[in-house]
């Protein structure tokens, strides 16, 4: 796991700040820095290394291929790289191996099979930049699901690229003009969706894509080498035909293989463990493949509705892992907030970024690599919106409208009080915390007229950002996106498909990458092995959502390793009490960022709707934490990048 940066342009490259660019990424790779230039071609590559495989100097980058044709900077892991070496040997390709890094394997494969054929054979997470000395072309690539980040764009005649925006910003020709279409989309979702970034002219490379740009050229070509939509459609048309037991067995075999491959490391390795279905499954399979206790990590909070530490500890004890947990004080959690703008580089408002950073920081004290359970919700139907979206749509609109108006007559705070009073009379599986805000959000969704509007309302904070962002053009074509999946035969599958395309890479994976790499920790995601994607999308919906139970097939797999009673409990999520903090210790900080004159002066938002939400939130009658957190994270980011 590493960070890289580089440039391509038509003047002397030795005067450009490659060193300055790569030093901004030293948190991603503190073990060594390297720079390579070809002044005659006007190209430069720089790399910050976090040594995971082959800790010797033979693994350092930028790295040149045996013939000298290719030079690469690489971020990620190729889990099947030893298998690729064996394939080369079987095909009688002669290579004088200098070490055992996956980067060297990639270069050898590039020389023999070419770049596209190689990455089609590769199993892993990656982003890389390769300079071809024969064709005089720069090739950028990003993995199939978007686990690893990659930004690029033309700035002042220079083509810049890097693992994070801060590397591009270090170049003296970088222009920091904010893209209001991107701001519109961010305000809605809490993240800037690819291919946009928050800056005009700077883009995220979309997952499963190659980018090619020639030396001296002023344009680039995008080539898709892998398509999630094609994989999903193929699976829907040719569904898995086995029994329930067959489905559990084939998933177990494939996931166990993925976990085993991702346990390969030359440095200490562990896993995040929340005690939920996804992380518990990964840890169970890790422990089954290990001769000694796996190291597992979790954090907890004083607030019971946010604390999963006891659940994780129970699962860890049953599986026999070497478990480390940490009870984080509210003050320690809040202390993360000032570093978020620099950590994420552009506005990002998933508040679970705070505990994700804290658990990464905890794990990094003991290990250099962690496995996580991310991705399972999107593949196996884990989110509540999959259970409720189609049910809401089945209710006639006039009835939904009346229900919505009735629900809104009771404030979120009153719903919370009523829920607490009813808890002793409810089964454990129905004892949810903090229901008021969720009930009100559901009430708003009841007024949506179509199933696609229901979905986008479910995943949006500000559903009408055009009324909030000044000089705004809509930054997200929702209808076009939804229509891409018109041949998906169930509403639930459409929602899951859109989450794989949008929410997973732009929110979940970005959150984990920046939080973990901020403390120089590599995170691997076994569920996102593309062969598991193939399997998951061939399984009919009934294997994922059955009788109101989400992730059915995954649960049945887990229950082969862990007792059902340790797992069957309401989903808590991985959050912090932002709503309470905004009324208490964060109030002064938030008030300064949401000051009406400040908002008016900066010119990005109309102040009135923001101030209304803020005052209603402070009253305690409404919980507008996500609405406000989106604005606050932009304001904090803008203040940081302007200073």
Image (cartoon, grey):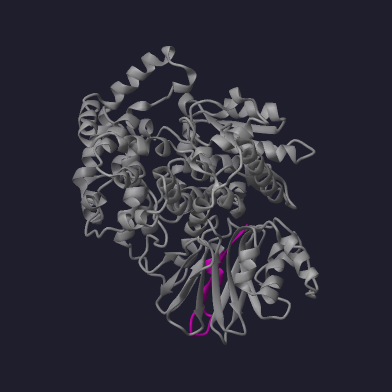
The quadrant where residue 185 appears: bottom left
- Residue 409 rendering spot, x and y as whole percentages: 21, 25
Q: Quadrant of the C terminus?
A: bottom left
Which of 206 and 240 lies nearest the eye of the viewer? Answer: 240
The quadrant where residue 35 appears: bottom right
- What residue occupies the far bottom of the structure in this picture? 40
- What residue occupies the far top of the structure in this picture? 425
Q: Which residues are magenta?
A: 1-22
* Residue at 27 percent of width and 35 percent of height: 446
Residue 14 appears in view: no
Q: Is residue 38 above or below residue 510?
A: below
Which of 422 and 176 lies nearest the eye of the viewer? Answer: 422
* Residue at 41 percent of width and 67 percent of height: 202
Q: In the picture provided, is 441 more to the left or to the right than 44? A: left
Q: Is residue 117 above or below residue 622?
A: below
Residue 15 appears in view: yes
Q: Is residue 423 above or below residue 549?
A: above
Q: In the picture provided, is 378 more to the left or to the right than 398? A: right
* Residue at 42 percent of width and 43 percent of height: 492
* Residue at 20 percent of width and 34 percent of height: 398
Q: Is residue 611 above or below residue 531?
A: above
Q: Quadrant of the N terminus?
A: bottom right
Task: Determine if the magenta segment contains residue 6.
Answer: yes
Which of 249 and 432 lies nearest the eye of the viewer? Answer: 249
Q: In the picture provided, is 175 more to the left or to the right than 91? A: left
Task: Determine if the magenta segment contains residue 83.
Answer: no
The quadrant where residue 393 appears: top left
- Residue 69 rendering spot, x and y as whole percentages: 66, 81
- Residue 305 rendering spot, x and y as whole percentages: 46, 26
- Residue 198 rendering spot, x and y as whole percentages: 37, 60
């Amino acid at each position: 796991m590493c960070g890289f940066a580089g440039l391509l342009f038509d003047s002397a490259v030795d005067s450009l700040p490659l060193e300055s660019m790569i030093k901004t990424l030293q948190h991603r790779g503190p073990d060594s820095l390297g720079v390579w230039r070809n002044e005659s071609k006007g190209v430069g590559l720089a790399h910050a290394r976090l040594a995971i495989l082959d800790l010797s100097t033979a693994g350092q980058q930028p790295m040149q291929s045996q013939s000298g044709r290719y030079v690469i900077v690489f971020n990620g892991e190729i889990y099947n790289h030893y298998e690729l070496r064996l394939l080369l040997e079987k095909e009688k390709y002669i290579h004088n191996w200098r070490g055992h890094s996956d980067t060297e394997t990639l270069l050898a494969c590039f020389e023999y099979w070419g770049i596209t054929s190689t990455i089609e054979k590769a199993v892993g997470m990656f982003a890389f930049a390769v300079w071809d000395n024969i064709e005089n072309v720069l090739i950028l690539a990003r993995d199939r699901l978007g686990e690893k980040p990659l930004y690029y764009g033309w700035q002042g005649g220079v083509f810049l690229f890097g693992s994070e925006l801060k590397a591009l910003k270090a170049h003296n020709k970088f222009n920091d003009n904010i893209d209001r279409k991107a701001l519109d989309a961010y305000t809605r979702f809490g993240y800037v969706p690819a291919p946009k970034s928050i800056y005009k002219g700077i883009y995220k490379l979309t997952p499963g894509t190659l980018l090619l740009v020639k030396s001296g050229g002023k344009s680039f070509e995008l080539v898709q080498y892998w398509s999630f939509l094609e994989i999903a459609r193929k699976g829907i048309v040719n569904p898995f035909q086995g029994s329930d037991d067959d489905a559990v067995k084939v998933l177990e075999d494939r996931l166990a293989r993925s976990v085993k491959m991702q346990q390969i490391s030359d440095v200490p390795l562990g896993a995040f463990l929340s005690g939920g279905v996804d992380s518990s499954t990964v840890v169970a399979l890790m422990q089954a493949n290990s001769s000694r206790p796996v190291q597992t990590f979790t954090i907890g909070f004083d607030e019971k509705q946010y604390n999963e530490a006891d659940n994780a500890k129970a699962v860890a004890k049953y599986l026999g892992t070497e478990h480390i947990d940490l009870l984080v004080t509210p003050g320690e959690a809040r202390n993360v907030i000032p570093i978020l703008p620099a950590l994420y580089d552009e506005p990002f408002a998933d508040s679970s970024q705070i505990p994700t950073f804290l658990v990464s920081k905890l794990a990094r004290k003991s290990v250099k690599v962690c496995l996580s359970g991310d991705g399972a919700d999107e593949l196996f139907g884990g989110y509540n919106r999959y259970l409720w979206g189609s049910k809401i749509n089945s209710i006639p609109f006039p009835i939904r409208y009346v229900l919505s108006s009735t629900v809104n007559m009771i404030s979120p705070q009153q719903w919370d009080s009523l829920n607490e009073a009813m808890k002793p009379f409810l089964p454990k599986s129905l004892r949810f915390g903090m229901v008021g805000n969720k009930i009100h959000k559901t009430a708003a969704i009841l007024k949506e007229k179509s199933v696609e509007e229901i979905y986008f309302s479910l995943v949006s904070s500000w559903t009408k950002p055009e009324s909030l962002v000044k000089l705004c053009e809509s930054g997200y074509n929702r209808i076009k996106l939804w229509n891409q999946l018109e041949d998906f035969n169930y509403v639930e599958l459409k929602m899951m498909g859109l989450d794989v395309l949008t929410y997973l890479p732009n929110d979940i994976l970005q959150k984990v990458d920046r939080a973990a790499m901020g403390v120089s920790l590599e995170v691997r995601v076994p569920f996102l092995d593309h062969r598991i994607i193939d399997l998951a999308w061939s399984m009919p919906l009934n294997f994922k959502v059955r009788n109101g139970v989400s992730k059915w097939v995954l649960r049945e797999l887990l229950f082969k390793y862990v007792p059902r009673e340790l797992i069957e409990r309401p989903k808590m999520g991985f959050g912090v009490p932002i709503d309470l903090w905004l009324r208490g210790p964060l109030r002064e900080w938030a008030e300064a960022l949401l000051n009406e004159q400040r908002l008016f002066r900066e010119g990005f938002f109309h102040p009135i709707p923001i101030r209304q939400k803020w005052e209603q939130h402070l009253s305690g009658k409404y919980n507008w934490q996500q609405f406000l957190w989106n604005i606050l994270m932009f304001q904090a980011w803008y203040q940081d990048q302007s200073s």
